[in-house]
């Protein structure tokens, strides 16, 4: 179930990237991100108001830094804006961002960084990651 | 070239950092509130960026000239962040990220195909098969962890 949901999230992301990329062509990447974040904020606020079933734990102590996490999500827009227009291009940018995310995923799961649960990296996790990197490379440089 | 590649790599770290911070907010306040905080933080950052390095003047008229269905990306983004906050505590960052990227590449290929941007179909299919072979590793029962 969770695996299917994660794959579904990936489908959502691909659709989102295509739509946001389309908008960026009309109004610019950072400006597009501004409009997208505003719409996303309103949507998320509506989801909160709807009081959908979800788990929360007010006793869960978190760093104040966590509330500023969205800033890092917006910084990537600026970074990508620079790198896609550099010699590495769109394919190189996607490949490196994927690699960076996976390396960071290993780091967080192994170290339990930021008080997240530590997880053992299984052989099949490693294999899946390698297949993803090879497959992405084949797709991006097709 | 190398510094741009490194910058994009750091971009991947930054994206991961964003996800785990927002996941923390989700564990305390719920996944939908985590999406609110994510978009609020992002909006403030982008607002300041445009304030210092750009201009707000053209945004509204240019947005009105764009096809309005493009704005759905913002709605999807709100759901996407909530899903991230839901899944990362259950699957861990690595598996969640790997599956999301796999799903993204698969639909990405379909979108590119229908927009006529696929140059080599055999190579694209090969790439897809390799990625899906990786995803299929999750289907073997012995590999399932008790994640509830």
Image (cartoon, coloured by chain):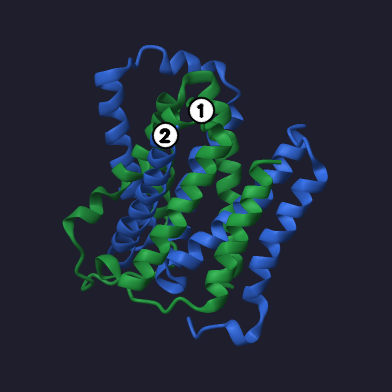
Q: Could you tell me which residue is drawn at 60 percent across and 31 percent down?
A: B69
> In this figure, which residue is indicated by the disc labeled 2?
B4
Label 1 and label 2: CA atoms lie apart by 8 Å
Chain B: give its colour. blue
Which color has been applied to chain A in this rendered view? Answer: green
Q: Position of residue B8 (x, y in %)?
A: 42, 40
Tag count in the figure? 2
Does the CB distance between marks 1 and 2 fall below 8 Å? Answer: yes
Q: Nearer the viewer, residue B10 or B37?
A: B10
Q: Residue at x 54, y 27 (%)?
A: A23
Residue A56 position, x and y percent, is 32, 69
Horizontal and vertical percent for residue A6? 55, 63
Q: Work out whether disc 1 and disc 2 sit on a shared chain.
A: no
Rendered location of residue A100, percent (x, y): 43, 51
Residue A107: quadrant of the picture: bottom left
In-image side of B118 versus A104 (left or right): right
Query: Dot 1 falls on which chain?
Result: A
User: How many other residues sit within 10 Å of disc 2, few (<14), some (14-19) or many (≥20)?
Assistant: many
Q: In screen coordinates, is B132 left or right of A73? A: right
Vertical side of B77 occupied by B1: above or below: above
Rendered view: A43 above or below B17: above
Q: Which mark is residue B44?
A: none
Query: Extreme front residue here?
Result: B2
According to the picture, the residue beneath numbered tag 1 turns out to be: A87
Q: Is residue A6 visible?
A: no
Label 2: state its secondary structure. helix
Residue name at image x 64 percent, y 66 percent: B134
Q: For this rendering, which residue is in front, B74 or A14?
A: A14
Give the letter of the chain under mark 2.
B
Say above or below: B92 vs B56.
Answer: below
Direction right: furthest residue: B122
């Amino acid at each position: 179930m969770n695996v299917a949901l994660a794959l579904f999230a990936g489908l959502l992301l691909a659709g989102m990237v295509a739509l946001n990329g389309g908008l960026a062509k009309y109004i610019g990447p950072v400006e597009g991100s501004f409009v997208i974040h505003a719409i996303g904020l309103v949507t998320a606020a509506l989801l909160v108001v709807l009081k959908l079933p979800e788990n929360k734990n007010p006793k869960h102590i978190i760093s104040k830094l966590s509330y500023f996490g969205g800033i890092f999500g917006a910084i990537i827009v600026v970074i990508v804006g620079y790198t896609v227009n550099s010699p590495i291009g769109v394919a190189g940018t996607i490949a490196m961002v994927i690699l960076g995310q996976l390396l960071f995923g290993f780091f967080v799961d192994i170290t339990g960084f930021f008080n997240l649960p530590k997880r053992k990296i299984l052989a099949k996790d490693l294999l899946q990651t390698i297949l993803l990197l090879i497959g992405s490379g084949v797709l991006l440089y097709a | 070239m190398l510094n741009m590649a490194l910058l994009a790599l750091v971009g991947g770290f930054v994206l991961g950092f964003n996800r785990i911070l927002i996941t923390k907010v989700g564990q305390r306040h719920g996944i939908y509130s985590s999406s609110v905080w994510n978009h609020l933080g992002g909006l403030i950052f982008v607002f300041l960026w445009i304030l210092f390095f750009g201009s707000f003047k053209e945004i509204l008229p240019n947005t009105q000239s764009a096809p309005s269905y493009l704005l759905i990306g913002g709605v999807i983004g709100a759901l996407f962040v909530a899903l991230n906050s839901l899944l990362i505590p259950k699957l861990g960052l690595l598996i969640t990220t790997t599956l999301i990227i796999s799903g993204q590449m698969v639909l990405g290929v379909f979108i590119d195909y229908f927009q006529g941007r696929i140059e080599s179909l055999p190579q694209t299919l090969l790439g897809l098969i390799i990625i899906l072979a990786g995803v299929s590793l999750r289907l073997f029962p012995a590999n399932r962890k008790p994640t509830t």
